[in-house]
Amino acid sequence: MPKLARVSIIVISLLAILATITVVVLPIALSRYIRRNMITILRERFDSDVEIKGLQVIALPYVYASVERVVLRHKGRTDVAPLMMIHKLSISASIVGLFQSPMHLSSVHLQGLQIHVPPPDKDERPENKEPGKKFAPSVLIDEVISDDALLETLPRDPTKDPRDFQIHSLVLRSFGFDRPATFHAILTNAKPEGQIDSEGQFGPWQAEEPGRTPVAATFRFSNADLGTLRGLSGILSSTGKYGGTLGHLDVEGDTDTPDFAINIGGNPVPLKTHYVAVVDGTNGDTHLTSVEARLGNSTIHSSGDVVGIKGVKGRHILVQAVSTGADIEDFLRLAVKGKQPFMKGIVGLRAKIDLPPREGADIIDRLILVGQFDIAGARFTNPDTQQKLDSLSRRGQGHPTDDEIQDVISNLRGGFVMRGGTITFSNLAFNVPGAAIELNGSYNLENEQLDFHGHVFLDVKLSQTVTGAKSTLLKLVDPFFKRNGGGSSIPIEITGNRSHPDFGLELRRQYDKEDNRRDNK
């Protein structure tokens, strides 16, 4: 056999052997290497039992590995959901990178990722534990990509439901278990409906207590439709920042809703807020440390809590609100129908806001308000109503024909309870020069019906409120309406609706009063 032929056969044989090693032996060896290291890394870095199924490896020219299913059970626990489940995991790396220290991977792609962050173990204090010896190699990943992931935080309190976050897109860069990684995530917010775009730093991962993993980031929430919250309308945008750990986040941000409206009123009023809050990442409960809201030209300061209830969809909002020197027109535009607010004035307000969750119900039907208010310098924008007040002031001062007494201002104060769209007022005090009114009653926000009963207290006798023959006749009934200390006390009722209120005497109560007075003599 010619020498050239022998050389060719040897070369072909070597190439065949090399091809066999490359196609058959190398993938098997790499598969074992990757499986062993993957299990070791995941077990130690996540402090979990690890299950891997369906590992496949392609060796050249680059190493590609895919796993059909990965399950991590934190500390081997089977009484809670797995810490992590991955439907499919794909890895790409160079052969050199696989054997470097730290191990270098070009990319990791996760599909169907589910993370269930467990509550802290009360029996363990990770800050006092000595770190154990690590056998897993260090890993540095250029890029981690996850599509349509679920992050669920399991609550400490078993009576509360887990908190879920749908993460459409998540990208981590320069990820290592011993260092923070930069991230960019897009999440879905259910109500109000919209997407949150967030970027910042995440890690290093705390294997002993995942909820203690640090995070610091900014967020943008744009074009959120408040119409997804029944009873509200408007488009909200928000920016802010958060930091701390997965289990305890300090949040600060701003919102802007230029067309905020309550459907029952229908008049949009610009609303801006600045808030500082603490979020318990294990259950989503939020403590509102400080919220400063700017409604039109009025400022409202509030604080409170937003908490979940086991088995109930939605959140329970409990807030204390205070406003001083506010413009009553801003509140009336929001809550009362009609383009023109029926009153002008400066209001002080204290209220407890209770908004329990109730699926399918409008906010106005769920909202419970309990508080007190004080309105100074009130004027009514309805000419008929203002004229009646002017007339009341003239008569109360004993000058029924003095037309110079006009455009009188009044002061109002009282307590209120709002429930089911109806406001019930108690100890409602209303005064103008020469007269004071004390009422109890209700106002329905839906049909605008009034139902008030009380007394008008005048500075003069009833006969002094008119002139001529009427005055003479009324002298006969002055004793029936005499008030202790002078003046008159007249029982009244106010009915009708906001646009056309009806003022009338409620003589039955006056007769009952006189009967009681005679019986007690």
Image (tube, rainbow, N blue to C red):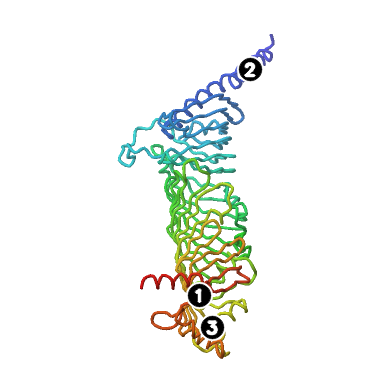
C-alpha span from label 1 to label 2: 93 Å
Looking at the image, tell me whether mark 1 or mark 2 is earlier in sequence order.
2
For label 1, count other residues whose C-alpha is less than 10 Å away and answer few (under 14), some (14-19) or many (20+): some
Q: In this view, does 300 lie to the left or right of 187?
A: left
* 484 versus 312 height, above or below: below
Of 496 and 349, which appears nearest the observer? 496
C-alpha span from label 1 to label 3: 15 Å
Of 235 and 444, which appears nearest the observer? 444
Looking at the image, tell me whether mark 2 or mark 3 is earlier in sequence order.
2
Q: Is residue 394 something one can see in this rendering?
A: no
Q: Report the residue marked by disc 2.
A: 16
Query: Which is in the foreground here, disc 1 or disc 2?
Result: 1
Residue name at image x 56 percent, y 71 percent: 329
Q: What residue type is labelled 3?
A: Val
Q: Is residue 251 something one can see in this rendering?
A: yes
Q: Which amino acid does label 2 sit on?
A: Ala
For label 3, count other residues whose C-alpha is less than 10 Å away and answer few (under 14), some (14-19) or many (20+): some
Q: Report the residue marked by disc 3.
A: 408
